[in-house]
Image: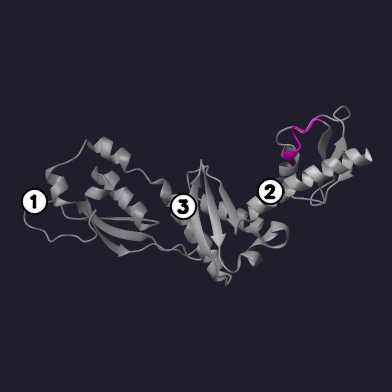
Amino acid sequence: MTDRLEPRSGEGREPPAEFEADTVDQAVAAAARSLGVAPEALEVEVLTRGSTGLFGIGGRKARILARVAAEAALHPAGTPAETAAGAAEAPGDLGGRVAGLCREILGRGGFEAEVAVTPDGSDLRVEISGPDVGLLIGRGGQTLDALEYLLNRLAGRGAETSARIRLDAGGYRERRARSLEALARRTAEKALRLRRPVSLPPMPPRERRIVHLALRDHREVRTWSSGEEPRRKVVVGPGRDRRPRHRRGDS
């Protein structure tokens, strides 16, 4: 794909057509589908680059002029149906939009941080790094959870995708998971030593699930959740015979 339109040479080529989308990449993909070629076979001139605006409000569309490059027009590769299928919206488009949203939110909040987005199966993993990650994590990860929820809502608005955004900052999620697993094992030992149930501090559903799963295969203890949100907690007790084993999805 060339980023500048070549002058018309009187060879009967079609004039460039204008396309618009949320991002330049999406506009190029739309042009490729419309013209029945791969994106690499286009001559493109960017008129305006898209912007999301604050939280996706007041944004501006990306606009391009595009036409089939002279060489591609003389030597087409594949049928229009084949090339159009190959020019479907790239998986990276959603990742780019998510990264842009995250950077905008952080910038508006005055945070100094870097954002990296990588595929994680059918989901997207967003990793934030930088000197302000401690502030972004918040007490017990509450600020991080709130930002993850906001990103999922904003990125999913008007998008035909079921991908879930999983947000982390400075490796906090992994460290917290390992810490909770160790806490679960210590609590199991305590419950067996005291021969009575032991309650853990209140936790959000995500963290309760980690504790349940850490002890799911323990032969001598059982786990269950007790109380109401936001004070709901995991209880670890000796034996398997008095309560049913933790079921998947129970928190």
Which of the marked residues, 1 or 3, is nearer the chain's N terminus? 1
Calculate the distance from the C-alpha at mark 2 to the C-alpha at mark 1: 64 Å
> Between tags 1 and 3, which lies in front?
3
- The residue sitting at 38% across, 46% down in the picture is 90
49 relative to 221, above or below: below
Q: Amino acid at mark 1?
A: Gly
Callout 1 environment at 10 Å: few (<14), some (14 to 19), or many (20+)? few
Query: Pointer 3: what residue?
Result: 95
Asked which quadrant contains residue 227, the reply is top right
Which of the marked residues, 2 or 1, is nearer the chain's N terminus? 1
In this image, 241 relative to 118: left or right?
right
Query: Pointer 1: what residue?
Result: 12
The residue at the far left in this view is 10
The verdict on residue 184 being magenta is no
Which of the marked residues, 3 or 2, is nearer the chain's N terminus? 3
In this image, 219 relative to 213: left or right?
right
Position of residue 113 measured from the top left corner of the image (x, y, whole percent): 54, 66
What secondary structure is the magenta-colored segment mainly? loop
Q: In which quadrant of the rendered image does the C terminus lie?
A: top right
> Between tags 3 and 2, which lies in front?
2
Query: Which residues are drawn in magenta?
Result: 214-219
CB within 8 Å, label 2 to label 1: no
Position of residue 44 measured from the top left corner of the image (x, y, whole percent): 24, 57
40 relative to 54, above or below: above
In this image, 50 relative to 129: left or right?
left
- The residue sitting at 73% across, 45% down in the picture is 181
